Image (cartoon, grey):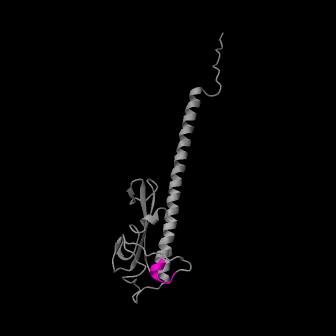
């Protein structure tokens, strides 16, 4: 006669399986939190770059509306709309609405608006901004068919996704450069 051996009683999960599950879920949640934090950084950088692109486009349209091209369709070698790097913008008039008639006052109104929109840009208007005629990127000259505009703003270290951003202390200078033909 055969004896029937009792079968082991199996019910639910063991304590070790529950601990492993909790650890895996916690790691997943921490990963999602880290991704969300990085997404906020990407979004903020995108907002600032979009603002810089719109400001550069605004200035190009102001320059185009002045119809300053010569008979060959080239921008002039000198203009009230140009600003060399490390030079200052002209002083803004008391009001910029309606837009002033002179090129230098229009440029100063644009600079004032830029300083208000981009974070830390007001401190960089003299040192990092330039508007010039250019034959090659980042090289201002009196020849060439393109107008080049560089804008800059400051953010905290690690918030600028620009590989060429310069780091100074706890702040990082982000730059946006636009080259276009009139």
In the image as oriented, which residue stretches furthest toward the top? 1
Q: Is residue 175 above or below residue 149?
A: above
> In which quadrant is the N terminus drawn?
top right
Tell me where residue 76 sits by quadrant: bottom left
Q: Is residue 1 left or right of residue 70?
A: right
Judging depth in this view, the residue of 181 and 152 nearest the camera is 152
Dividing the picture into quadrants, the one containing residue 174 is bottom left
| Residue 6 image point, x, y percent | 65, 16
Query: Magenta part of the protein: which range?
Result: 100-106
Question: Residue placed at 40% from the left, 88% from the top?
Answer: 70
Question: Where's residue 5, x and y in %?
Answer: 64, 14
In the rendered picture of this protein, how many numbered marks are placed on residues?
0
The picture places residue 115, in percent across and down from the top left corner, at 48, 67
Coordinates of residue 122 in the picture (x, y in percent): 46, 66
Q: Quadrant of the C terminus?
A: bottom left
Tell whether position 65 is magenta: no
Q: Which residue is painted at 47% across and 72% down in the image?
A: 111
Residue lying at the far bottom of the rendered structure: 71
Q: State whether residue 68 is above or below residue 46.
A: below
């Amino acid at each position: 006669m055969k004896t029937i051996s009792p079968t082991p009683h199996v019910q639910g999960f063991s304590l070790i399986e529950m601990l492993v599950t909790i650890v895996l879920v916690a790691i997943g949640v921490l990963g999602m939190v880290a991704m969300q934090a990085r997404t906020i950084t990407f979004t903020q950088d995108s907002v600032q770059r979009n603002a810089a692109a719109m400001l550069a486009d605004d200035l190009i349209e102001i320059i185009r509306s002045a119809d300053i091209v010569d008979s060959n369709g080239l921008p002039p070698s000198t203009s009230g709309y140009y600003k060399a790097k490390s030079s200052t913008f002209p002083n803004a008039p008391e009001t910029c609405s309606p837009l002033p008639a002179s090129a230098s006052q229009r440029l100063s109104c644009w600079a004032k608006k830029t300083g208000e929109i981009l974070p830390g840009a007001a401190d960089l208007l003299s040192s990092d901004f330039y508007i010039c005629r250019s034959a090659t990127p980042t090289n201002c000259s009196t020849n060439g068919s393109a107008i080049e505009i560089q804008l800059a703003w400051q953010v905290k270290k690690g918030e600028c996704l620009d590989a060429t951003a310069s780091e100074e202390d706890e702040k990082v200078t982000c730059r946006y450069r636009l080259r276009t033909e009139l």
